[in-house]
Structure formats: structure tokens, C-alpha cells
Image (cartoon, rainbow, N blue to C red):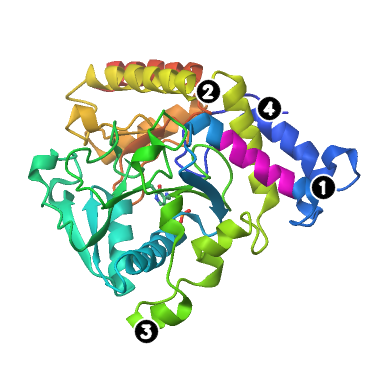
Amino acid sequence: DREEPNYFGAGPALLPTSVLQQAAYDLINYNDENLGIGEISHRSKPAIQVIDDTKANLKSLLNIPDTHEVFFMQGGGTTGFSSIVYNLFANYAKKTNGKKGKAAYAVTGSWSKKSAEEAQRLGFDVDIVVNTKDKKFAEIPPYSEWKPIDAESTAYLYVCDNETVHGNEYKDTPAPDYLPEGVELVADMSSNILSKKIDVSKYGLIMAGAQKNIGLAGLTIYIIKKSLLEQPSDEELNKYGIPLPPIAFHYPTVVSNNSAYNTIPIFTCHILKLVTQRLLDNGGLEKQEEINKKKAQVLYEALAKYPNFYRLPVTSESARSNMNVVFTLPSDELEAKFIKEASENKLTGLKGHRSVGGMRASIYNAVTLNSVELLVDFVKEFADKNA
Ligand code: PMP
């Protein structure tokens, strides 16, 4: 057991204590079979059941239509950056009888930047349609300012739905009118999946590492439009001069093996099952979204009351993340003092990412409104004393 932590770490992040307690038991003795969940074969019936239940929970929570499939892979978000490129370009070659094509990337923070760089590194043709680096990722510009997409030659548009480090988020489906028909929308939702309702039918592919909002490291969730699973044969790809996706990250192979082509970390999947079950039992994403909005609102409001003390680097209000609330103080000394005194008040995990400094309160699903209110009280007190 443990006292409820008020922990705002960005990832790996807080999980509900009740889920961890159940999982801890199951790690030792699952279903009273005298064996732990991590000790059974990934092809055994109980393991397959865990995978199927987790998929069913995700389908139910996100209202995933029959046009889409859910699967899991290892390798985290970073492997997603690479696997997306191989698989979607292979699919594009299938659709166009061997065309190489290019991909459009919207760079709105360090994670989309990394993803674009990986696509380039792997030798694919990348078109950066928007890049806010010079503005320190302080906004998501209106689509009218994005470079138009060449529908004839573009396989997909890639966005990072929530930039974990810089704290900006698309509040609605990205690029609604901007995206030409036939160009697939691909989104990294590693730090906000299951934080809000989304319209899955609008996406070609959603990718999300589990270790922030909904689980442990070790599993990445993919939700893919089934038509994107079609790929040329290896021989055809070779003939076209398009690289083959590595087999463990070859989406059609993973899907046709129910996410267990190779050994799936079933304990991590089990945690995901418990977290998604709990979300369903507690009123689904509608309820969770309402709580998340409230948490973000009270925290941003508290910070905004002291505009000369707390600075919000995401200047565009509508782009401020409901998951990662990033803010700075007037000096390094005050920031260090803030972290120290917060920790003395049992408010932890508030240090900003090493690349940007400052403060970051990650208020994922498992962080309660009560924890956020305690942080709000501290934010006010600290400003009153030090401003
Ligand atoms: N995308 C986003 C939005 C992230 O926040 C992170 C991790 N912080 C990643 C990708 C990379 O994930 P991983 O460490 O699992 O490779």
C-alpha cells in the first residue's frame, strides 16, 4: 500500500494505486494458477485473453470503427517514429504501383521534430509543412499558414497531438480542412491518448507509447485504418527500391499474429487492460475528459493570476496542453526554490524537461483533481511569498 502520491512526472508517470495493487498480486499469482502473469507463455489462453480484452476495452473507450484495427508493439514512441515511415511508404507503394512519394510533417515541438528527423535519416522524402521552432514552439499556427500539401505525391501528414516537452496540444482533430483527400493523418498521441474523446475515423494511424497516460513502458498502441495494412510483397518492394519494414515492426505481420508475432510484454499489456477497464467503469472518456479539462483549467488560471511571476511559454491559449502544463519563474534560483519547497509539500515530479528547463506539471489521467488543487494552493502561496 502507499499514501496517494501527488506526483506530476512526465513519464513514466503515475498510475492508479488500485491498478498497481491488482497487478502486483497478478505478477505473483494470476487467476490463482500459482504462476505470475509474466511467467506464462505469450501464446497461452490467458495471455491471449489479456490481449483481446485490452483491445476490446480500447475499441469501446475510443469508439473505434470496424474500418480500424488495434495492435501493440514494443519499442516505445521512438520505434513508432521509424516503423510508421517504413510501413506507410510500403503501403503508399502498394496504392501507387511503386511510387516512392513523400510525407508531410508538422513540427510543433521536440517530438514531432525528432520524428521528422528519423524519417529523413531513414532516407525518405520529407516535407516540413510547418515548423514553429523559431517561435520556441509557443503556438500551433492556423492551417492557412501551413505550406499546402501536394496531394499527388504525399503519403501522409504526421503530427504530434500533444508535445510533452513544450506543452502544446491540438484540441480537435488536426488539420481538418487543410488535409487533402487521400492523404492519411498520422498522429503521435503518446502523452494524451485516452485523455479525451477523439474521432478515430479521421485518422489513418494513431501511435502512442503507454508509459505516460495509461500504463507502463514496454508497449506501444497502434490504431490503424485497415486499408493501410496492405503492402507489396518483399520482392515487389525490392523491385521498387523501397526498404522493407523490419519483421518485428511489420504491421501486417504483427496484426495477423494478434500482436504476438514475437513475445509481447504481457504484464505491461495486463496493466493496460486494468487501466482501460477502470476508465470504462468510471464513465469512459467523456467523464475523464471533463475531469482533465477541469484540472488544466484550475492550474492555468492560478498561474495566469501572476503574469509577472509565472510565465507560460505556450503563448497561444488554445494550444496549451491539458496534459503537460509548462511554466517558468523569473530566475533559476526561484525555480530551484519552487522545486525544493514543492517537494517539502509532497508535490513532486515538477521539474521541466532538461532541454527546456523551467517547470512542468504533467496532469495525466491518474493525477486527481485533488492533487492538482494542492498544487494550485502551493502555486498561489509561493507567488504571494516570492513575487
Ligand atoms: N512521443 C512523445 C509525444 C513523447 O512524449 C515521447 C516520450 N517522452 C516519445 C514520443 C518517445 O517515446 P519513447 O521514449 O517511448 O520512445
Is tag 2's residue or tag 4's residue first in the polypeptide sequence? 4
Residue identified by numbered label 1: 36
Closer mark to the observer between disc 3 and disc 4: 3
Q: Position of residue 170 (x, y in %)?
A: 28, 36
Q: Position of residue 17 (x, y in %)?
A: 65, 29
Q: Main secondary structure of the magenta part?
A: helix
Is tag 3's residue or tag 2's residue first in the polypeptide sequence? 3
Q: Give the amino acid at mark 4.
A: Ser
Is tag 2's residue or tag 1's residue first in the polypeptide sequence? 1
**What secondary structure is found at the residue carrying circle 3?**
helix
- Of 329 and 276, nearer the camera is 276
Q: Give the amino acid at mark 1.
A: Gly
In magenta segment, residue 101: no
Residue identified by numbered label 2: 284
**What secondary structure is found at the residue carrying circle 1?**
loop
Asked whether disc 2 touches disc 4, contact meaning CB atoms under 8 Å apart, the reply is no
- Report the residue at 24% width, 27% height from top: 310
Closer mark to the observer between disc 2 and disc 4: 2
